[in-house]
Image (cartoon, rainbow, N blue to C red):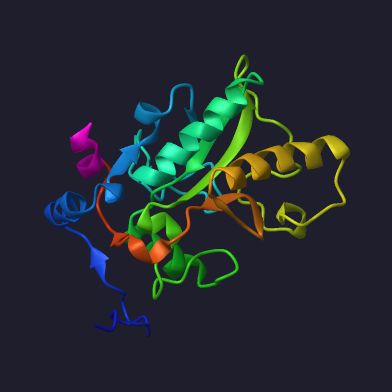
Amino acid sequence: MVAQDTGYIRPPVTDKYEQYKKQVKQDLNKTMVELKQAIPGILYDLRYASKNNFMHRLMYPAGTRHTFLRKPAAEALKKVQEELAKKGLGLKIYDAYRPYSVTVKFWELIRDERFVAHPRNGSGHNRGIAVDLTIITLKTGQELNMGTGFDNFSDTAHQGFSKLPEAVMQNRQLLKSLMEQNGFKPYADEWWHYSWPSAVKFEILDIEFKKLAKDL
């Protein structure tokens, strides 16, 4: 079907909780895992559940406290956290699963593929395989210096940008090396964005956070 007044064909989207559960029954790897429940010590700063984001508005329901990844991605992320913990470090999550309807809202407001995913394709976030994150010091919760903040759209945020202090480069490399060692793929334009491979194996979801949280 062509989405009304948008000019693009809406991809197949799983928007019923019961449909999602049937998919999980057929393949347990499609289970959406709540990250705090699965990964001890991980912190959240869910930017789109507040106005502290580049949109300066709530994109998720106020009070959203949960975020999710598909089972293999969550298990891999747990290994990253365990490796960091040996150094007194840990992970902070800015965003992971994003309902498809939110991607549509982003597109309606921005309409620029440099900054937001086009709804005709959905995104890794919609499939539960993409995560936006950084490294923190476990003792204080303070973020390591990565050179820019989250959702910075300058060249400085690119994975390949090298005109940065050595300490910043080392921090970025630590995150990148551990994520890649555990199966994630970096996104070239954002140092904080990583995806689990084989996106086509996972359906685009438009299930509310609170419905996924029913399984907790």
State the image coordinates of residue 157 (x, y, percent, origin top left): 71, 53
State the image coordinates of residue 118 (x, y, percent, origin top left): 46, 71
From which residue to which does the magenta span run? 210-216
Q: Is residue 18 magenta?
A: no
State the image coordinates of residue 91 (x, y, percent, origin top left): 56, 31
Tell me if residue 154 can be seen: yes
Task: Please indicate whether residue 52 sits to the left or right of residue 202 in the image.
Answer: right
Q: Which picture quadrant has residue 63?
A: top left
Give the residue drawn at x 41%, y 72%.
Answer: 121
Tell me if residue 46 can be seen: no
Q: Look at the picture and state if 41 lies above or below 16.
A: above
Q: Look at the picture and state if 93 lies above or below 10.
A: above
Magenta: main secondary structure? helix
Task: Please indicate whether residue 203 sits to the left or right of residue 46 in the image.
Answer: left
Residue sitting nearer the eye, 37 or 120: 37
State the image coordinates of residue 202 (x, y, percent, origin top left): 33, 60
Residue sitting nearer the eye, 14 or 74: 74
Q: Which picture quadrant has residue 139?
A: top right
Give the residue drawn at x 66%, y 52%.
Answer: 152
Q: Look at the picture and state if 84 lies above or below 5.
A: above
Q: Which picture quadrant has residue 211?
A: top left
Residue sitting nearer the eye, 212 or 200: 200
